[in-house]
Image (cartoon, helix red, strand yellow):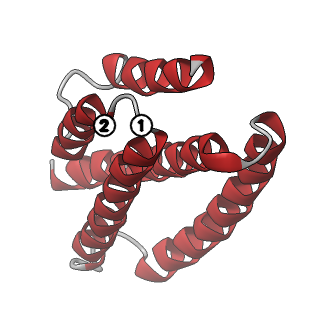
Amino acid sequence: MKNLFLLLSLFITSYSFSQEDRHSIDIENGKCLENAVPTTIGSIKCEQAALASWKTELDTILKQLKADPTLINIKLLEETQAKWLAFHKSDVKFYESYYRIQYQGGTMARAAAVSYEKRHLRERVLYLLEFYEELRE
């Protein structure tokens, strides 16, 4: 129970220190997590839903970036994204193994791993969104 409280505190704290204009996915995820307390399975479902939303957002921003090939090198963007994705998968796998050891398996390990994967993907999407905004200026 103590670990669950610490994990949920981590989730909530990460939202508190996020950007001033919170993304709609973050807002929805925060509401979901508030309603999921105190179950770990509920938290996992919230994080998985947010992860799916961030994946959709990633696809959307990549399509937007590729829409005008006069602004950026599309081939280089695709190459960079492929390399980032390989890094992302490897990084998530590493942290999953760490959390399995840290929490001795179980739902806490899964909750921590999904949360990490979501945060990592979120950072990439926000970076690409910011880049896209710069291109449009």
Q: Is residue 41 above or below residue 56?
A: above
- Where residue 43 sits, quadrant-wise, is top left
**In which image quadrant can residue 49 be found?**
bottom left
Residue at image location 22% in from the left, 77% down from the top: 68
State the separation of the CA atoms marked 2 and 1.
6 Å
Secondary structure found at label 1: loop
| Residue situated in front as seen by the camera: 73 or 45 | 45
Describe residue 27's horizontal placement relative to residue 70 as left or right: left
- Choose between 23 and 36: the one closer to the eye: 36
> What is the three-letter code of the residue carrying label 1?
Thr
Q: In the image, 94: left or right of 77? A: right
User: Against 96, is 115 above or below?
Assistant: above
Q: Are marks 2 and 1 in contact (CB under 8 Å)?
A: yes
Q: Which residue is mark 1?
A: 39
- The picture places residue 107, in percent across and down from the top left corner, at 60, 47
Q: Is residue 48 left or right of residue 108?
A: left
Residue 36 — which label?
2
The vertical placement of 41 against 62, above or below, is above
Residues packed near mark 1 inside 10 Å, few (<14), some (14 to 19) or many (20 plus)? some
Please identify the quadrant where the N terminus is shown. Answer: top right
